[in-house]
Image (cartoon, grey):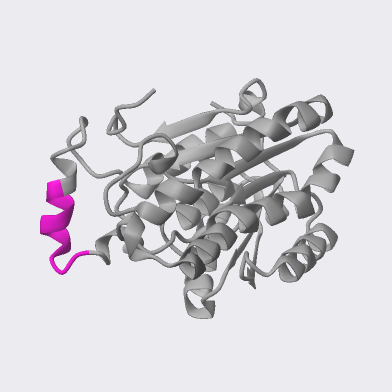
Amino acid sequence: MDLGIAGRVALVSGATSGLGRAVAVALAAEGARVAICGRDEHRLAAAAARVTDAAAAYRAGDAPERGCVRADRVDLRDHDAVRGWIDAVATDLGGPDIVVSNAGGPPAGPVTAFDLAAYRDAVELCLLAHIGFVQAALPRMRAAGWGRILLVASETVRQPRPQYGLSNTVRPGLVGYAKSLVPEIAPDGVTINVLAPGYHRTPALTGQFDDPDAGLARIAAGIPVGRIGDPDDFAATAAFLASERAGFITGSTVLVDGGATQGW
């Protein structure tokens, strides 16, 4: 199925590894012109190479300008830097048409393990950074009459998880923000959805265990499909929601968790 995003300009934050990188690769493979950002220059360069490879595969026999990639070192919490990045991408590539707002998660631990400073940091990383990204990109999308916004949250927006107190508390705010924004931007052809990933085989997850294989096996035992998600599973969902085909889906929270979440 042609997703209809060849030539569209996509911004993907937090794209140096894991889910963000997988989404950037998937969009480039569909012919989107992808700009990525992250905080680690070494990992950013490696991610850019992966995205460029996907773009090159798409470009075979197609227009040479499609699928190109730009990579910039940007911390999503630095709102001035984010605005500057968007301006630079717009000048270089056009757009943006697609915004995938992804950022690292807060530290794991029970609710009572953190002081107010930790909660403030979590609000900045898991809520305000995303809102700032959207606010900076939105005027151009509305003026163009087309846009796709994806906010990457967590399954904790639907069901609190033990030992994820900060995520359980802060990330549901993204759902409220997205729902509230829908009636304001839908008339301009812009959609916004929240992606709620469950457990995926990413460095952020495997790094939580002394024995990653054993730790992931314990988690997989509690997932109905019987396995940990692959970043490509998540990326395929994101690519569809970012596509021309998904224009009637907005204000939704889409779980990508192998059926693990028991709530509605």
Q: Nearer the viewer, residue 24 or 162?
A: 162
Residue 84 point in image, percent of width and height: 79, 68
Residue 123 quadrant: bottom right
The single residue placed furthest to the bottom in the displayed view is 42
The single residue placed furthest to the top in the displayed view is 248
Residue 214 point in image, percent of width and height: 10, 57
Whether residue 228 sits left or right of residue 158 in the image: it is: left
Specify whether residue 64 is painted magenta: no
Answer whether residue 25 is visible to the viewer in this image. yes
Above or below for 74 versus 153 = below
Q: Residue at x 20, y 30 (%)?
A: 224
Which SS type dominates the magenta stretch?
Answer: helix
Specify whether residue 212 is painted magenta: yes
Whether residue 202 sits left or right of residue 130 in the image: it is: left
Exactly how many numbered labels are in the figure? 0
Q: Quadrant of the C terminus?
A: top left
Answer whether residue 30 is visible to the viewer in this image. no
Q: Nearer the viewer, residue 84 or 33?
A: 84
Residue 248 point in image, percent of width and height: 65, 20
The residue range painted magenta reads: 209-218
